[in-house]
Image (cartoon, coloured by chain):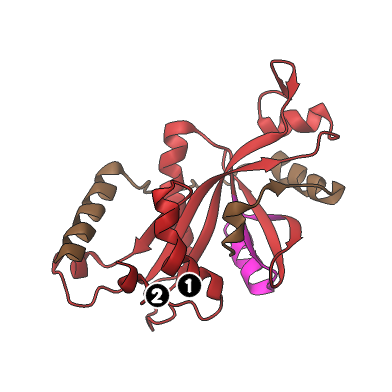
Chain colours: A brown, B red
């Protein structure tokens, strides 16, 4: 991981990279769902409230 | 808050540690990324003196660009719908970026795994996908076999290698829809 990743433009320039990307795109989406428990707004609000309370304690 | 965040350490990658210490709050304020800390609900609710940061993830939106020279057929495959919009070639594709992901080296606990961290990132991204769509997730990791294998096991595929400050980074992508 690198902080620079947030800043730089992600650009594929080589034919090899494009080919690899195409192979990914042609492949099937994994059958396993991305998430079985999406992070809900309710959970987010509760967590943020608890953290705020903790930090002001 | 800042002082508390410095309790997080990442022995294997100083950049991950410094991001949480000095950048995460700024990125949050600018909406450049969202950072999620892995904490213990009981410690939070009981307001225990020492609140441990077990790990964290940072997620952002990015654009993946491809050269103009690629064929329209490939472009359409990437977009999923069309190669052009209003007669203009589509060269940029939106993706989610898991920009940081790490356990806290200071916590000698077997409780949190890399798989769990990825799963947490997916939980956050899944909510966004439900709301606004999205087809790809990207990560960049150091060129280390163990790391690459870890992401492969979590459905990421290598697409490119690029130079970074200290060493080569491997760019990997996951198709999600």
Q: What secondary structure is marked by label 1? A: helix
Q: Measuring 38% from the left and 75% from the top, which residue is drawn there? A: B6
In the displayed structure image, the side of residue B148 where residue B69 appears, left or right? right
* Residue at image mark 1: B17
Whichever of callouts 2 and 1 sits on the residue coming sooner in the sequence is 2
| Residue B76: % across, % down | 73, 28
- Is residue B146 located in the magenta-colored stretch of the structure? yes
Q: Are marks 2 and 1 in contact (CB under 8 Å)?
A: yes
| Residue B130: % across, % down | 43, 35
Q: Quadrant of residue A26?
A: top right
Graded by Cα atoms within 10 Å as few (under 14), some (14 to 19) or many (20 or more), the crowding at tag 2 reads many
Q: Nearer the viewer, residue B23 or B155?
A: B23
- Is residue A22 located in the magenta-colored stretch of the structure? no
Q: Measuring 48% from the left and 66% from the top, which residue is drawn there? A: B19
- Magenta segment boundaries in residue numbering: B138-158
Q: What secondary structure is marked by label 2? A: loop
Q: Which mark is residue B8?
A: 2
| Residue B148: % across, % down | 66, 66
Q: Look at the image and tell me in which quarter the C terminus of chain B lies.
A: top right
């Amino acid at each position: 991981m690198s902080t620079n990743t947030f800043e730089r433009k992600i650009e594929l320039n080589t034919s090899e990279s494009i080919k690899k990307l195409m192979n990914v795109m042609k492949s099937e989406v994994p059958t396993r769902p991305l998430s079985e428990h999406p992070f809900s707004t309710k959970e987010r609000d509760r967590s943020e409230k608890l953290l705020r309370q903790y930090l002001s304690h | 808050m800042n002082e508390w965040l410095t309790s997080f350490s990442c022995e294997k990658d100083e950049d991950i540690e410094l991001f949480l210490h000095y950048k995460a709050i700024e990125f949050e304020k600018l909406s450049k990324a969202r950072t999620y800390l892995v904490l213990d609900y009981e410690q939070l609710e009981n307001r225990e003196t020492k609140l441990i940061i077990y790990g964290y993830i940072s997620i952002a939106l990015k654009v993946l660009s491809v050269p103009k020279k690629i064929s329209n057929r490939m472009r359409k495959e990437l977009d999923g719908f069309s190669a052009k919009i209003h007669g203009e070639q589509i060269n940029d594709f939106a993706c989610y970026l898991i920009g940081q992901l790490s356990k806290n080296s200071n916590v000698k606990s077997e409780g949190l795994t890399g798989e769990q961290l990825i799963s947490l990132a997916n939980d956050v991204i899944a909510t966004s996908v439900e709301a606004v769509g999205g087809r790809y997730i990207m990560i960049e990791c150091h060129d280390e076999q163990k790391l690459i294998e870890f992401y492969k096991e979590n459905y990421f595929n290598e697409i490119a290698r690029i130079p970074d400050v200290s060493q080569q980074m491997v760019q990997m992508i996951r198709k999600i829809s």
